[in-house]
Image (tube, coloured by chain):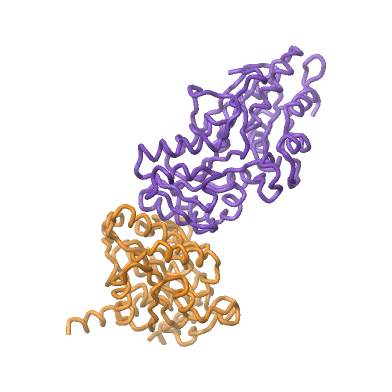
Amino acid sequence: MQTSTGKREWRLCRDGFGDAIIELGKTDRRVVMLGADLSESTRALWFKEKYPERFFSFGIAEQNMLCAAAGMALAGLIPFVSSYGVFLSGRAWDQIRTTICYSNLNVKMAGAHGGISVGPDGATHQALEDCAVMRVVPNMTLVVPCDYHETRKATLAVAKMYGPAYVRYGREKVPVVTNEDTPFELGKALVMRQGGDITFIANGYMVSQALDAAEILAGEGIEARVINMHTLKPLDREAIIRAAKETGRIVTAEEHQLAGGLGAAVAEVVVQTYPVPMRMIGMPDSFGESGTPEELLTKYGMTAEKIVTAARSLLNKNGETATV
Amino acid sequence: MSEMSELEKLQRMCRVVREDILRMIAAAGSGHPGGSLSAVEILVGLYFSRLRHRPAEPDWAERDRFILSKGHIAPALYAVMAHAGYFPREELLTLRKLGSRLQGHPAKGRPPGIEVSTGSLGQGLSIGVGLAVAAKLCGYPWRTYVLMGDGEIQEGQIWEAAMSAGHYRLDNLCGIVDRNYMQIDGSTEDVMMLDPCADKWRAFNWHVIEIDGHDIAQVVAAYDEAASVKNKPTVIVARTIKGKGVPFMENKAAWHGKAPNAQELELALSQLY
């Protein structure tokens, strides 16, 4: 599982979504695709090219698209809705809450362009609150895959389960840290690296950064466990509790606001079950701005180096627990 | 002759449904009498005449679909469904009470026959669009009906849905606007002007039928006309009176969302026409 940083392949999560929906379209005639004028970018176009009769354009009108997907689900179809995360989770939140989730309808949502790494488009297009607002709605399943393979597997997995599901991923190529054969089970965290001194719990792009951080610390004789918490809801509470008990310190890392995201979800479990010191890496209650993905991730502190710094703050020289 | 008696039966049903609406809302102590009373003929004409459904088999695959987009008039829908045989009439008095299936706004499957949860205005027509698109894709024969309030069509999403229904030529979709000209804050034309209402729908490529929404013969005829229109969705703009049937409630915005007390209920039932 551990890959040396320099040799990693970089691929688009969006392509994992695109490849998955083509597979789904082939094997299940109930699968339909809805697009809101971003079909090339979200890869919905790949589905349209193969199965034009099962692709439906809804124009720049996300609220209608989400409720139309609800209607299609009521008729027994499995609608996939794709757009940018800000528009899907923000513009259509009430539609997702009241029409889709309250009625527990089988609508699958693909929120592209999650995170600050959207880059030059700036704050309007950088979805940094999407996980928080999707996580709090009952009946929702929320997945934040870490790379191409995991996005493909997550898309296939949400198609198989019944109920509303949201898959969130970014715009840019990200390091491939899993492979075709890496296990993926909704709601079951993936331990990507064993370690007993501290645990990093990450999702999305930040999984690769957590792995890099663990490598850096390994050079200092510190063994960090790295947990890929791809499913944010339902959360794998057992994996979190085990990490708290066995390593005594947790650093979370996500490309999302610190409020309401992965770190908050982990903290909710930790403080109620086995309190241990924690640090959280993510967006510090701020909107983004234009810049390259690298510049923005560095400026706002979502890097392997920041995870290392946070880890060090939890570990003193002797590896004992720091005071909170 | 038999047609006359059929209409008379529907008219009698409207009266009984109005009584039930008033009793339910009074028993609940809250609810929306005004818009419930204005939509009675629209609902009775559908459920007791033109809707293809099997109350004893609520998930019959070939049933027509009905979506109550103006979810706050749930009491009218529940009363009509109870009389149609979906559930016992006695249950109506459990409206809005803890543990009741009859939620303040309709909740999917509670009781069976409620197709989807509604209550946040502006979303039902889009659900209808999805159902109608799916029916066309899969070759299903059933039709989809969506009842909207007139105040509700101030929601922008209604026009997103209207645009998409016209775009996909959904002739298996029928919208109904309960055009009672009243909403919570007063006249629709004062709160946010809706006229020319019919022209708006025509501009979105809909076939429009304008009727007196309290004339049951016109209501039923409109459903038939809608079913005969090809290549376009149809909207029935039904001119109605908010609070219809209870003189002291008619055209009074104050009765949009207020329950009658015991004396008011007695008065309302005695005056009901």
Q: Is residue B12 above or below residue B25?
A: below
Chain A image colour: purple
x and y percentages locating residue A164 in the rendered image? 48, 45
Q: Position of residue B215 (x, y in %)?
A: 34, 84
**Chain letter corresponding to the colour orange:** B
Task: Give residue B11's quadrant in the image.
Answer: bottom left
Q: What's the residue at 46%, 87% (across, down)?
A: B247
Q: Position of residue B172 (x, y in %)?
A: 33, 64
Looking at the rendering, in which quadrant would you find the C terminus of chain B?
A: bottom left
User: In the picture, which quadrant includes the N terminus of chain B?
Assistant: bottom left
Q: Nearer the viewer, residue A295 or A248?
A: A295
Q: Is residue A285 above or below residue A58?
A: above
Q: Residue furthest left?
A: B1
Taking the spot 62% from the left edge, 46% from the top edge, the residue there is A130
Extreme residue in the front direction = A49
Tell me if A296 is positioned left or right of B119 in this view: right
| Front-most of residues B116 and A18 | A18
Q: Quadrant of residue A11?
A: top right
